[in-house]
Image (spheres, rainbow, N blue to C red):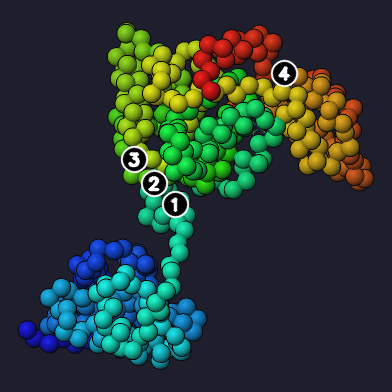
Amino acid sequence: MAGWLIREYTQDDLEAVIRVDTESGTTGEPPLFQLSDAVAALQAAHPAVVAVSGDEVVGAAVGRVEGDRAWLLRICMAPAWRHMGMGSALVTALEDRLLASGVRAVHAVLPEGETGATALLNCGYEAREGLVFFERRGPVTAEAIGLLSSLGAELPPGGLWQKVAGMRREKEIIERRLVLPLAHPELASQHGVEPPRAVMLFGPPGTGKSTFAHAIASRLGWPFLELFPARLAAEYGLAAGLSRRFDEIGRLDHVLVFIDEVEEVAAARSGADPTSVGVVNELLKAIVRFRGQDGRLLVCATNNVTILDPAFLRHGRFDYVLPIGPPDRVARVALWESYLAKAGAEADGEALADASEGFTPADIAHAGRTVSQAQFERTFDTGTRSRPTTADYLATIRTTQPTVSPAMTQEFTEQTERFARL
Ligand SMILES: Nc1ncnc2c1ncn2[C@@H]1O[C@H](COP(=O)(O)OP(=O)(O)OP(=O)(O)O)[C@@H](O)[C@H]1O
Ligand SMILES: [Mg+2]
């Protein structure tokens, strides 16, 4: 076999280096640095060399400089060129360039016995026995990020869970039934607990269903992906769109999928309308497939649980059917206190909670905002800082129409008895 030459890497070599790298491994152990790390270093013009035989790239070594240190990200060779000293030649050539650029130490981490290990030993590298490599991976891998953003998913900021004021009962149930088994799947499975895969939230408008969905994703550190049936329908037709989107979701590691106003796609199948039958069937199938994979949660929300197709609520589709009602007194106090603090108000949260029975979090947010805006305008007009009082809030509460009427509260209580599964 002819000999080889070592030369500087150029951008035209990229494809060949990737090809050599994929056939180079001998141990089957994944390397510390992923191929994407090596490609990123090559594209950022960190030092790298290739071995060529004729016109063909048959080996490569890729470095990455960090201050006065450098990592050997890759030492790879085509299989036919092993055991001929090429590894040592690549390491030496790359090392020359690294040292010339001011590097004082070069590190490499390889699976035991991997291609390149002998070369490092031959070049005088010292193997540090007894070091243990610790690793903790974030829930979102670099590869997943591209897919996530193409699907319109977002990584919710941390701390949303803590920002859900009050709602102690709902939070406790969600924390224990959903978050704990998903965050600790191994411990759960030792107890025969299967992590939940799908949950239905129902309740009157503005009670915080969407807020909870975001907060659960934030609590788990998972990406949040909302499906908009109307958009899917416009693009592909609803049934096909759902099926296609759930296939794509299947390629993600971790994700919380949210469908708001799910009654629009999951209303009872009426024999007369074959399209709606197809859609409901497709969604049911998608949920069954979705349930087959770890690390994901489907959250659906509805204001009208009574019109959902009964097949949805059957066991085996949704693990829990949770009522999210108007906040109780404790929750209203907590909600008021949070707005009072933001407004710098000197007002009695307990009194406001008493006066706002039947208010949803959205109603309280609206009343709080109305008072803040009025005070802001007053400060602006008078030039002296004005602080809202209990009387200001009570006046606004009296003129606010609560979203949830007594009749709706009654309905919600009945629905909770009929549909809730905790
Ligand atoms: N527990 C809470 N603490 C603080 N703010 C809340 C809470 N719950 C809801 N909110 C606020 O109230 C508003 C309405 O909440 P959200 O949109 O989650 O309600 P929803 O049940 O999804 O309503 P809809 O049925 O209309 O979709 C939002 O601005 C949200 O930030
Ligand atoms: Mg909502």
Label number found at residue 140: 1
Residue bearing the label numbered 4: 358
Give the secondary structure at mark 4: loop
- Please report whichever mark, 2 or 4, sits nearer to the chain's N-terminal start: 2
Does the CB distance between marks 3 and 1 fall below 8 Å? no
Does the CB distance between marks 4 and 1 fall below 8 Å? no
- Please report whichever mark, 4 or 1, sits nearer to the chain's N-terminal start: 1
Residue bearing the label numbered 2: 253
Query: Residue drawn at (46%, 24%), measured in percent from left and top?
Result: 262
Hey, what amino acid is under mark 3? Gly
Q: Residues within 10 Å of mark 1 (few under 14, many from 20)?
A: some
Does the CB distance between marks 2 and 4 fall below 8 Å? no
Is the CB atom of the residue marked by disc 4 within 8 angstroms of ligand 1's nearest atom?
no
Q: CA distance from mark 2 to mark 3?
A: 8 Å
Taking 99 as reference, is 394 above or below it?
Answer: above
Q: Nearer the viewer, residue 386 or 352?
A: 352
Give the secondary structure at mark 1: loop
Q: Position of residue 88 (x, y in %)?
A: 25, 86
Hey, what amino acid is under mark 1? Val
Does the CB distance between marks 4 and 3 fall below 8 Å? no
